[in-house]
Amino acid sequence: MRKYASFDEPARARNLVLQGVRAVDPERNLDQVLDLHIRDGMLSIGPREIPADADVLDLRGHVVTPGWFDLHVHLREPGGEVAETILSGCQAAMNGGFTGVACMPNTEPPLDDAGRVRWVMEKAASLPVDVQVVAAATRARAGKQLVEMSELVDLGVRAFSDDGKPITDTAVLRHALEYANMLGARIFEHADDPDLSVGGAMNEGEWSTRLGLPGMPPLGETLDVLRCILTARYTEAAVHICHVSTKESVEWIRWAKQQGIRVTAEVCPHHLLLTDERCREFDTDFKMNPPLRGEEDRQACLQGLADGTLDTYCTDHAPHAWEAKAQEFDVAPFGVVGLETALGLAFTHLVGHHLDLNAMIARVVYAPRRILSQPLPAIATGEPANLTIIDPEGSWTVRPEEFRSKSRNTPFKGWELTGRARGIVNRGFAVIKEA
Amino acid sequence: MSLLSHKHLLGLVDYSESDITTILDTAERMKEILERPVPKVPTLRGVTVVNLFMEPSTRTRVSFELAEKRLSADTLNFAVSGSSLSKGETLLDTALNLEAMKIDVVVMRHKSPGSPHFLARHLDSIIINAGDGCHEHPTQALLDMMTLRQKFGTLKGLRICLVGDISHSRVALSNIIGLRIMGAQVMVCGPATLIPREIERLGVSVTHRLDEAIQRCDALNVLRIQMERQDAGLFPSLREYHQYFGLTRRRLEKAPAPLTILHPGPMNRGVEITSDVADSEHSVILQQVTNGVAVRMAVLYLLAGATTPPTEMKV
């Protein structure tokens, strides 16, 4: 039905039936084929007659899960509107099957006070995507003075991060953890050791040697992961490790969880599916931070996602304008877009290979919302409809020119994928693409 | 397509043994031209070559420029100072502007690894890498191999050691790649802090003792050590570097047979090499410079001008 295919003017889900879908919600022990009725954004399931005036979408063969949530996204607004805006980033999320995103504060200016955070929240308020702002942990992301966390938590912020770089001063890290913990919020750490990574453009190893590019040793990330874990233990606070990329990081996080230390972690599609050899053509779409690592690291990340050591699968969606990436490899900025490929990559390469669908749903639906202390969406009568609609057999080719994102910097260009986000329902809207 | 089955010379990593042999054979013919009373041929008449040097360089640029003039190409030097680069223009825009003026070949020196590869993706011109950061410097390795081949007749089985800062040396990387393709045995010798990780994966052995290298090699290629590496804390001092990794006559006298000594220049006399070694009868350092012009003529000819095999070349 064409009216539901609009991204620019999302249609209201006033009276809509998603017919014949396989609804999967492991928290509710639900996995069955049924019709989902949505009236004024609210869900009802079970056998019932289809109202004569309802819009009926035949979605036989499709899987519907509670809405996917991407815990690590850069929306670039304010300051980076050439690459992405709150609107275009949310449209990319919708196109990729995400009903919620957590956006990072390294904008220009950074999101380090209530005024700026509120401005982003208000811009996103009318969209079908839940935007959870991760505020900066320190003022101007300078790593020295804490932001006004209490006021921000009152606004709804549940996570603080200087993402893009670590909080290098361990005293500041400790105090950030303690203060955030007092408020029930969490610190997200971009784990790295800037002294070890200074000037680096890719992973340090055989390929940095072959390509003559300055390397970023895996040691830098691992050291900071361990520093965060031990500081979290000392302060009894919760810490979240962003975009884990090294084998040793995975091992230390697994150990910490066994010790009962409050650590959570995330992993990105590119670290699960690509290695540093991909930099061999000096294509800047393979340049991100943390960088692509070696095969052992990749395998450890896959294992970590499978066994739950890595709680969530997120994209680190980092849009950059074409002209920014069309530079020398060591000059071009770090980052790749991910919102519109993550689901397809997961269905093609992860689900059924490394973890089952229920486990995947746990990683992309429940874990990120638990980390942010958000209510969990459910497929149940009387719940707000917050759904991701997936065509698990839909095959497609990654064509960056078809992205809703304003940026095209994907390392998965040209990949053939099986499993496609068909649409989302959230906040009273339905955006469902034509078959 | 040229006789090399390559459009560009971005690095030796793409080239085969027969490609390198073709270049070295052609370079020998070019060397003959250079020894004539009028060392100039019309081979590249009408071909426009831009020397795009975005990093300070004197000898490589002069060597290329001379090679271009000997082949009668029209040459244009585009150096970083006084150019639009200082106005914040991107590398791509600079290159596209040059190409819009109808050029055929870009000889490129740039501090960023992969920058010639980047231009090759966006331009139609032939790109020759004259050094991209710490990545490759293919014509330097070719002239080193030409010099070694003149001395030893073949590169196969030859034992070469590269001495010094391997981590930051495009000369080392291109030599390792080229020499391995040609069947030579390659060793690298330097302080542990200046040997890049997993270099063994490139098929080389590693030593941190120069005396051991001297015992086990036929030729030493001594690399320039840069002061900034000391400032970055990669080794304690030039004094200590000289004492443990500097090539001296006293060290060389312990070799089982006289070793051939190469250096890509410019030399820090008294640091990585002493004058009594640099100027000795076993040094081929000036021969390298002469061969440099011949090798660059060969590369230009094979990529931009060759329509007949070098054996039938009208010179």
Image (cartoon, rainbow, N blue to C red):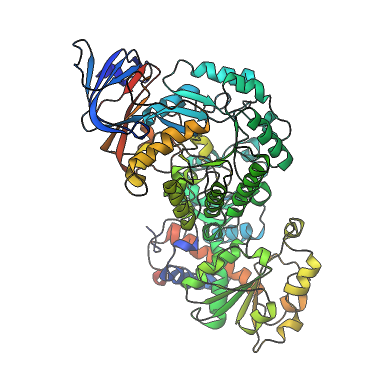
Residue A150, image x, y percentages: 66, 23
Relative to B228, residue B123 above or below: above
Task: Say which residue appears at 75% left-offset and 78% top-offset.
Answer: B248
Q: Residue at x 43, y 27 (%)?
A: A376
Locate residue B155, reporting x and y percent.
51, 78
Residue shown at 65% from the left, 60% from the top: B59
Position of A348 relative to B37 (above/below): above
In screen coordinates, is A49 left or right of B51? left
As drawn, the residue found furthest toward the right would be B239
Q: Nearer the viewer, residue B194 or A174?
A: A174
Q: Which residue lies furthest to the bottom in this view?
A: B256
Q: Is residue A89 left or right of residue A24?
A: right
Judged left or right of residue B110, residue A415 is: left
Count of numbered tags = 0
Do we see residue B125 in this rendering? no
Q: Quadrant of residue A395?
A: top left
Using the rendered image of the protein, determine whether residue B63 is visible from the camera's viewpoint: yes
Q: Is residue B64 above or below residue A346?
A: below
Q: For the N terminus of chain B, which image quadrant?
A: bottom left
